[in-house]
Image: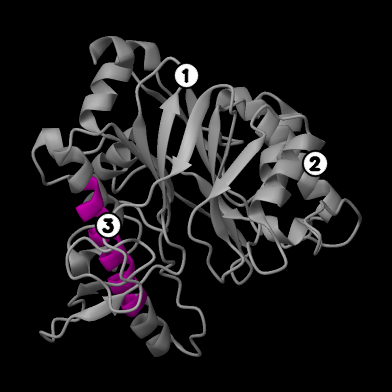
Amino acid sequence: MRLATYNVEWFSKLFDQNDRLIEDGSWSGKWNVTKSMQVNALGKVFQALNADGIMIIEAPDASINQSTVTALEGFAARFRLRQNKAMIGFANDTQQEIAFLYDPAKMDVIHDPQGIAEPETGAHENPRFDGTFHLDVDVDAKPEKIVFSKPPLELLLTPKGGTPMRLIGVHAKSKAPHGARNKQQAVRISIENRRKQLAQCIWLRKRVEQHLDADDDLIVLGDFNDGPGLDEYEKLFGQSGVEIVMGVEKPINQTLREPHAEAAMSARAGNAPTTSRFYNHRDKTYLNALLDFIMVSPDLARKSTPAWRIWHPFNDPACFDKKDMCDALLTASDHFPVTIDLDILATKAVK
């Protein structure tokens, strides 16, 4: 079974108010790329991935007038994808949903949120992801109320011929200092955003430990807007959010596996894998970063012999050697897909 995570840059802007694809020469949300160009590039990438299930980050909008599910299933029909059924969890108001597009012939999937449902007050222990988490993030002995602008998507996935597993799709808070008017404001906003991002990751880690304690097979995947050694603010807090969710200081049977994150931890001053590429208009250069991950519970990693891959247009030889694929990846999004192949029959045999 192949699973993927893919952050699609402003996917929502490629659909009209009736959730139909817009394939014309108008500009998309991606700089210097038309909607037709981005739509067709995405079609090529999704076809090439050939994944049984794809966790889509920044999926089309869900609102009173629009449907993420209708939009994605229409996209799947347009490109004849076998991943033709879509699902979301708790919708948000950012126009960037977390959704799962999958092949119903290969798996059964239900939205199965965990935790206590107290959206307004928030449960102090084990709150549901559409609720409120209480944590003192600024060391003033007064817990702040932490919420997800994009609540993680919790799924119970049962592969045909395999055993059930838990999936958690994540789009953690950005640390970028949006709205800063000077350097001092940029520093202050960056620190505030990192505190909130780390708090979200602590909340996620609590859910991870809940599943590990229950001996659940678990995969946590998505865009964490963070990674080991990514920026200088990590020194202020000791760990990245990714390391917190993985549990790198925990016993090995409580630590999630993610080889790209592990490579970044051991190569902080050298080359590390990357999953995204952003253009810096001020410096007129490209910034590469490792932001997208697929984390696997230790027992599942041991049983299913997973193989991870970043579909990077320059760093993956199979992508780089095919110019049309390389171009499609660059046109489709500022993030690149990450996939994992799992031997679910081996997993079934062990259980």
Q: Earlier in the sequence, mark 1 or mark 3?
A: 3
Q: Is residue 254 left or right of residue 6?
A: left
**Of the numbered discs in the image, which one, if any, rests on residue 238?**
none
Q: What secondary structure characterizes most of the magenta part?
A: helix
Q: Amino acid at mark 3?
A: Gly
Q: What span is colored magenta in the figure?
A: 191-208
Q: Which mark is residue 115?
A: 3
User: Which labelled disc corresponds to residue 40?
Assistant: 2
* Residue at figure coordinates x 82%, y 47% from the top left: 37
Q: Amino acid at mark 1?
A: Lys
Query: Which is more N-terminal, label 3 or label 2?
Result: 2
Spatial CA distance of label 1 from label 2 is 31 Å
- The foreground one among 278 and 81 is 81
Residue count near mark 3 (Cα–Cα under 10 Å), binned few <14, some 14–19, many ≥20: some
Residue 343 visible? no
* Image position, residue 277 (x, y; %): 56, 51
Q: Is residue 201 magenta?
A: yes
Which mark is in front, 2 or 3?
3
Q: Residues within 10 Å of mark 1 (few under 14, many from 20)?
A: some
Q: Is residue 9 above or below residue 82?
A: below
- Residue 167, placed above or below residue 186: above
